[in-house]
């Protein structure tokens, strides 16, 4: 089994790349979804841990209000570090289990779709790192539209992540997602053929 770590900063279009890879036959594990599931299922009492650190105001109907939590962690670096220290160990546990399950199923290609691939040290579980890139202005505009937030909030979210230049330096492959979709699809198909020829 080959494992691709798919990363890139927020609103870079990783989901579109994941979708293309899924259509080519890859299994995709979306780490953002895993994080949401951990919170929704209150896995290992994660809600209590988050409430203890961030206060009762982020809890609504015994669930975490992700919008409120997001506005705190994206405007305060220490708050984001604290949230990651709660979430990353639980997400890592789930990721390792998912990798094991896919090995047993004899999956050919597994894609780990994770914005925080490097920050969480999940790159150690993958064979290749693909970084999806778009210009900063594109990220900000996409975030404003997608999340219905202000420009200031969008800038805070973009700036809360490790710089894209640092990610590009560590990448095996860089996908420029500001080009037209057909060009991106062709590049992915070429990369897919290189990876799968040896499986």
Image (cartoon, rainbow, N blue to C red):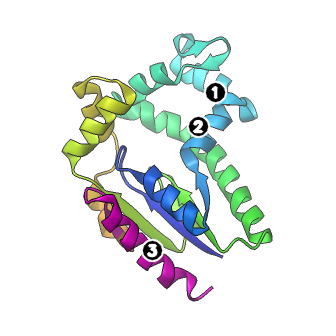
Q: Quadrant of residue 140?
A: top left
Q: Residue at 66% x, 44% y: name it.
A: 90
Which residue is found at the position 27% from the left and 53% from the top? Answer: 134
Q: Do labels 3 and 1 touch, CB within 8 Å?
A: no
Give the residue furthest to the right: 104
Q: Which residues are magenta?
A: 174-199
| Residue at image point 64% right, 31% down | 39
- Identify residue for label 1: 49
Principal SS element in the magenta part? helix
Q: Label 3 to label 1, Cα distance in Å?
A: 43 Å
Q: Which residue occupies the foreground of this view, 110 or 70?
A: 110
Q: Position of residue 68 (x, y in %)?
A: 46, 19
- Mark 3 or 2: in front is 3
Real-space Cα distance between discs 1 and 2?
A: 7 Å
Lower position in the chain sequence, tag 3 or tag 1: 1
Which image quarter: residue 171? bottom left
Query: Which residue is under mark 3?
Result: 189
Q: Horizontally, is 172 left or right of 105 in the view?
A: left
> Is disc 2 placed on a helix, strand or loop?
helix
Badge 3 vs badge 2, beta-carbon distance below 8 Å: no
Res 118 label: none
Query: Dots 1 and 2: beta carbons under 8 Å?
Result: yes
Q: In front here: 67 or 123?
A: 67
Q: How far across and down, in percent of the image, does residue 198 sit?
A: 58, 89
Disc 2: which residue: 86
Look at the numbered disc 1 and give the secondary structure of its residue.
Answer: helix
Report the side of 136 relative to 169 (left or right): left
Does the magenta segment cover residue 112?
no
Q: Is residue 121 visible?
A: no
Mark 3 secondary-structure assignment: helix
């Amino acid at each position: 089994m080959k494992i691709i770590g798919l990363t890139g900063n927020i609103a870079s279009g990783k989901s579109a790349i994941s979708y293309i890879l899924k259509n080519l036959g890859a299994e995709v594990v979306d780490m953002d979804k895993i994080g949401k599931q951990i919170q929704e299922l209150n896995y290992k009492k994660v809600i209590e841990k988050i409430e203890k650190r961030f206060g009762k105001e982020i809890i609504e109907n015994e669930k975490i209000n992700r919008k409120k939590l997001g506005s705190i962690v994206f405007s305060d670096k220490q708050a984001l570090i604290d949230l990651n220290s709660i979430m990353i160990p639980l997400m890592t546990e789930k990721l390792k289990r998912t990798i094991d399950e896919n090995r047993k199923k004899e999956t050919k290609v597994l894609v780990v779709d994770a914005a925080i691939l490097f920050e969480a040290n999940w790159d150690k579980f993958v064979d290749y790192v693909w970084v999806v890139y778009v210009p900063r202005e594109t990220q900000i505009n996409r975030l404003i539209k997608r999340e219905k937030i202000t420009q200031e909030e969008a800038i805070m979210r973009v700036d809360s992540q490790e710089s894209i230049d640092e990610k590009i330096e560590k990448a095996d492959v860089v996908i420029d997602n500001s080009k037209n979709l057909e060009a991106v699809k062709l590049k992915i198909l070429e990369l897919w053929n290189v990876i799968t020829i040896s499986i």
